[in-house]
């Protein structure tokens, strides 16, 4: 997608999930480059888009702690 200020690209899988995105200036200067580090095909059993859902999480335990530094 391109607008007056930026170029945005998205990688979308068949289910409609966004797994990567980039945002750059019109001159090609990269501003944002992100990607999914994990992708699950199962949909959470709870509604993750409600006020009630703010009291819980669907984040897997393996992503609830900081990664180990390679140093």
Image (spheres, grey):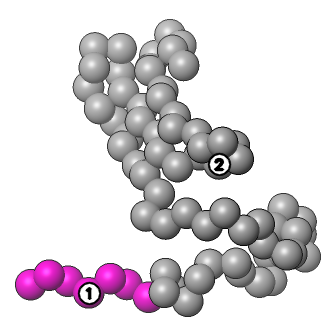
Q: Which residue does the numbered mark 1 point to in the structure image?
A: 68
Residue at the spot x=34%, y=36% of the render?
31
Element type at marker 2? loop
Q: Going by the picture, which residue comes out furthest to the top?
A: 4
Q: Which residue is mark 2?
A: 17
Q: Residues within 10 Å of mark 2 (few under 14, many from 20)?
A: few
Of mark 1 and mark 2, the one earlier in the sequence is 2
Across and down, in percent, residue 8 comes to: 48, 27
Observer-side mark, 1 or 2, equals: 2
Q: Which residues are magenta?
A: 65-71
Q: Any mark on residue 39, and which?
A: none
Residue drawn at the location 71% of the way across and 80% of the way down: 57
Residue neighbourhood size for the residue with mark 1, other residues' Cα within 10 Å, grouped as few (<14), some (14–19), many (≥20) = few
Relative side of 27 to 14, left or right: left
Describe the element under mark 1 as helix, strand or loop.
Answer: loop
44 or 41, nearer to the observer: 41
> 57 or 43, which is in the foreground?
43
Quick check: 16 above or below 7? below
Measure the alpha-carbon separation of dots 1 and 2.
Answer: 28 Å
Q: Is residue 70 magenta?
A: yes
> Where's residue 29, x and y in %?
26, 25
Q: Quadrant of residue 24?
A: top left
**In this rendering, is residue 44 above or below 56?**
above
Query: In front: 54, or 65?
Result: 65
Q: Quadrant of the N terminus?
A: top right
Is 64 rendered above or below residue 11?
below
């Amino acid at each position: 997608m391109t607008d007056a200020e930026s170029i945005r690209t998205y990688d979308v899988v068949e289910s409609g999930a966004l797994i990567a995105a980039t945002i750059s200036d019109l001159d090609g200067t990269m501003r944002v480059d992100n990607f999914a580090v994990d992708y699950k095909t199962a949909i959470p059993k709870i509604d993750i888009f409600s006020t009630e859902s703010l009291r819980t999480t669907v984040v897997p335990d393996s992503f609830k702690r900081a990664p180990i530094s390679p140093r």
